[in-house]
Amino acid sequence: MPGMTFELSREHEEFRRSVREFAEAEIAPHAAQWDRDHHFPVDVVGKMGALGLFGLTAPEEYGGAGDDGDFTSLCVAIEEIGRVDQSMGITLQAGVGLGINPILTYGTDEQKQRWLPALVAGEQLAGFGLTEPGAGSDAGATRTKAELVGDEWVVNGSKQFITNSGSSITSLVTVTARTGTREDGRPEISAIMVPAGTPGFTAEKAYDKLGWHASDTHPLSFEDARVPADHLLGDRGRGYAQFLATLDDGRVAISALSVGCIQACLDMAVAYAGERQTFGGPIGRKQGVAFQVADLEVMLHASRMLTYRAAAMKDAGAPYRDFKQAAAVAKLYSTESAVTATRIATQVFGGYGFMEEYPVARFYRDAKVLEIGEGTSEVQRMLIARGLGLPVE
């Protein structure tokens, strides 16, 4: 877009420094222990809220940053939190992108007034239930149903892999559900807001995951869970389309989380390569190591540029088609680069990289899901190809 720049402003860089100071003081010293204990630090979520991180895209009337915040700022915050702990990075990403923004974008004034202030303050969290056992990338295969009975929606079904859905401060989960059949015979899918504590709504036992041990992730079940009719989010029958648009923003935010991961890998690899002595000198003198670290630098710069280019397009109101393509490109490249970066960093550390006492092992475990959540790498390639005009199925 003519006239656009993808360089971060002075204000964004100052904001980055403040988030980095917070992350290094409040998160970094505890991240390894939280990971070992599978502990979700509710108090830190509150501190992130107090710093304003959950309100970066929200208007002032709900306690948000208003004109002082934007989508780029959110990406900066996610990157810096993710640089020290991917679990807290995804907590912020999902809390805003999947919890707050759908309500902010599609909610009624009453829904916004009811739910947003506590979510923006970090006092509560919200999740969004799309994925099901038989409906992941094929989200149109949703089986969860919501029937309008009188003045209530009766929800039945299940969801899986839902972030921020079962913590002690989770206030609601918005779920996609079949609410009827369209004229063309395809299912009508709508979004229904289900408050925590609703009879029939259960956040099942938390997953035992490969990574992201300190984030909150549950399967959900609904057995005749009844909510008022006004808990429909957005227009009836538009739930699927609404969530696809939500995912585009989420892909850029996951890209920012990936940039934080790559930055952490680069920082750790450079430090270790300069300290570790073999054959009379630091291993960083060896081209076999130095060249791999150099590759990390290249991946970092490319991923960061793609991420903030997409974020700048979002903030500038770029045509949706252009932004959608930029989001898919950023997500594909940065997430695959993050997985590669953790492998390289672990290799630089050698045997120590395989030991949990070193953070590189945690980042190695955390990275893989970046290629899966918010649309797999295969889905991103499909979207990019379609954006080029190819009739890919």
Image (cartoon, rainbow, N blue to C red):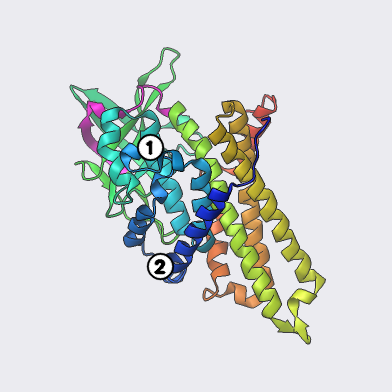
Q: Residue 294 magenta-drawn?
A: no
Q: Quadrant of residue 88?
A: bottom left
Is residue 362 shown left or right of residue 108? right
Nearest the viewer among 138 and 283 is 283
Magenta residues, as a range? Answer: 221-240
- Which quadrant, please, contains the N terminus? top right
Asked whether 26 or 376 is in front, the reply is 26
Dot 1: within a 10 Å radius of its alpha carbon, few (fewer than 14), some, or many (20 or more) residues?
A: some
In the image, which disc is placed on residue 34?
Answer: 2
The type of residue carrying mark 1 is: Pro
Find numbered disc 1 in the image and state the secondary structure of the residue it sits on: loop
In the image, what residue occupies the spot 65% across and 28% down? 386
Direction front: furthest residue: 10
Eyeballing the image, is 188 above or below 162? above
Question: At 39% across and 50% down in the image, what residue appears?
Answer: 52
Under circle 2, the secondary element is helix
Query: Mark 2 belongs to which amino acid?
Result: Trp
N-terminal of the pair, mark 2 or mark 1, is 2
Rounded to the nearest angstrom, the CA distance separating label 2 from label 1 is 33 Å
Q: Position of residue 103 (x, y in %)?
A: 36, 34
Could you say which quadrant of the image residue 30 lies in? bottom left
Q: Residues within 10 Å of mark 2 (few under 14, many from 20)?
A: some
Q: Is residue 22 above or below residue 312?
A: below
Q: Position of residue 77 (x, y in %)?
A: 49, 52
Q: Is residue 286 above or below residue 279?
A: above
